[in-house]
Image (spheres, helix red, strand yellow):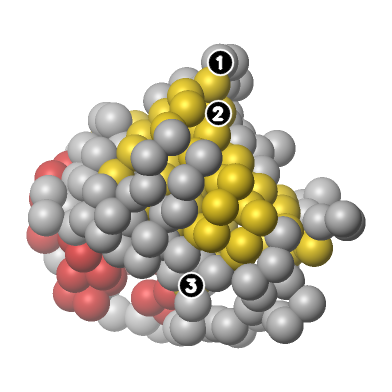
Amino acid sequence: MVVVAADILNKFGRNGESPDFFDHDALVIDFSHLDADTSVFDLVPLLKVLRSCSLVPVAVRGASVEAMAAALAVGLVEAPPEVYKHREAAPQSDVQEIIREVVHEVVREIPGPGTMVVDKPLRSGQKIYARGCDLVVLAMVNQGAEVVADGNIHVYAPLRGKAMAGARGNTNARIFSLCLEPELISIAGVYRTSENALPSSVHGKAAQVRLSNDGQDKLIIEALNN
């Protein structure tokens, strides 16, 4: 759990990659991916980390009897069974699964009318957030730069930094770029990094990124026809 807390801080903490990603969003912690015989751990340090990232832990689901008792003791409640939605996923480590569920549970769908337009290149360290609207970038997004939007992201130039569309849970959001070479792409919290190289059919080409419509939360990356 120490590793989980460190990963969350690195991503969403005050000095992390996306410190303003959450805005006191309610959170349900899912333990269903842990083995039933996993020993009970102290939840208080994890709760402090989540709250420092502007998350509000309110409930737990999928926990063993002992783990649920520990959660109730620190003020959390048990999420009712009907809120649970089973998800098939490829085998991953416990840490990866918990982080994935944390991100998935806190986002909520908010339509994003309007458009923000940026007409200058974004340098490393710069971050643009189009709150409640689409984002259109007319110049290059360099490595180390970050573009975030509650709606769609359009980059009419090379995209070499990070792009996160549907930041508040809009699963219909998309990312478009005339030259897709990103460090990270994300739709509604489902992400892919440059460590997992893009296929040659889309890398460095005009392409779009969207979520699959089969309920599996998979990123679909497609070349745009000329």
**Left or right: 221 with respect to 54?**
right
Circle 3 — which element?
Answer: strand
Q: Secondary structure at mark 1?
A: loop
Residue type (three-letter) at the residue carrying disc 3? Thr
Label 1 is placed on what type of residue? Gly
Question: What residue is rendered at 27% in x and 30% in y?
Answer: 24
Q: Residues within 10 Å of mark 1 (few under 14, many from 20)?
A: few
Tell me the crowding category of disc 2: few under 14, some 14 to 19, or many 20 or more residues within 10 angstroms, Cα based: many
* First in sequence: mark 3 vs mark 2: 2
Q: Is residue 114 visible to us here?
A: yes
Report x, y in % for residue 93: 46, 83
Q: Is residue 192 left or right of residue 43?
A: right
Query: Which residue is label 1 attached to?
Result: 114
Reading the chain from its start, which is encountered first: label 3 or label 1? Answer: 1
**Circles 3 and 2: CB atoms closer than 8 Å:** no
Q: Quadrant of the C terminus?
A: bottom right
Q: Quadrant location of the N terminus? A: bottom left
Label 3: how many Cα within 10 Å (few below 14, some 14–19, many 20+): few
Going from the N terminus, do you reach mark 1 or mark 2 first?
1
Q: Camera-side residue: 164 or 38?
A: 164
For the residues bearing labels 1 and 2, Cβ distance under 8 angstroms: yes
Q: Which residue is mark 2?
A: 134
Whole-percent x, y for residue 105 in the image: 48, 45
Residue 111, position in %: x, y?
59, 21
User: Label 3, on which residue?
Assistant: 193
Q: Nearer the viewer, mark 3 or mark 1?
A: 1
Q: Is residue 105 above or below residue 160?
A: above
